[in-house]
Image (cartoon, rainbow, N blue to C red):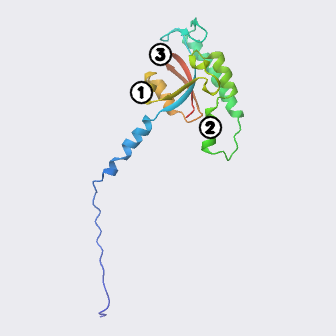
Amino acid sequence: HNVNAQCTAVVVYFLQKEDKNVQQPPPKKARKEAESVRLRHILVKHRECGQPFDPVRNRPVTRSRDEAETVLRRALRELSAEAKTIKLPADVGKAKLAAAALQPTPKYTALCKELSECTTAQKGGGMMGDLGWLSQDQLTRFGPSFAETAKALGVGQWSDLAGSDQGIHLLQRIA
C-alpha cells in the first residue's frame, strides 16, 4: 500500500442559472425584425385602389386590377431577365453587392419612368422610385401583404407583386 498515492474526487453540479442574458436573444431578434428596410418600387394603380389617379401623368386611372397586374408581370419578367445578364465578379464582397443594389439598373430606370404612377418616379438618378427607409410601422401602413413581401426580400432582390391601398407594387429592397 503506497502512502504517497493520492485520490482526488471531483464532483460537478450543473445548476440552472437564472441568468438575465439567457432572456436576451428573443428581444434582440425582435429588434432585428423591427429594423427598417429601404425600398424602391414601381407602382401601378387600378380603378379599385384608394385614389385611382396618376399624379405623375395627372390623369384618372381606369385600368382594372388584372390589367395592372399584367403590366407589372411584364416589368418583372424584364427586370429578372436583365438581372441574369448582370455579371458580378465571383470575388465580389457583400459591401460591393450592397453598393450595386443601391444603383438602379437601366431597365428599372426605363420601366419606372414608363409605368410608375408614384411621384417617386419623378426623382432623379439613383433616387428614382425610392421609398426611402421604412420602419415596420410604415411598412404595415401599406398593408399586411406589402409589409410581409418587403420583409422577405434580400438586398437587391425583386419582389413578386405586392398590393396596397395605393395599387400594385413591384418592390426591390436596396438596403
The quarter of the displayed image where residue 156 is located? top right
> Residue, x 31% and y 86% (percent of image)?
6
Q: What residue does disc 2 label?
A: 99
Left or right, residue 107 beside residue 22: right
How many numbered tags mark residues here? Answer: 3
Residue that label 1 marks? 137
User: In this view of the protein, can residue 102 be seen by the observer?
Assistant: yes
x 59%, y 33%: residue: 157
Instruction: Quadrant for the C terminus, please.
Output: top right
For badge 2, the amino acid type reads Ala
Residue 133 location in percent, x, y?
A: 50, 30
Q: Earlier in the sequence, mark 2 or mark 3?
A: 2
Image position, residue 83 (x, y; %): 67, 32
Which residue occupies the foreground of this view, 106 or 9? 106
For label 2, the SS is: helix
Q: Can you say which quadrant of the picture contains the N terminus?
A: bottom left
> In this figure, which residue is indicated by the disc labeled 3?
165
Indicate which label's residue lies in the foreground, 3 or 1: 1
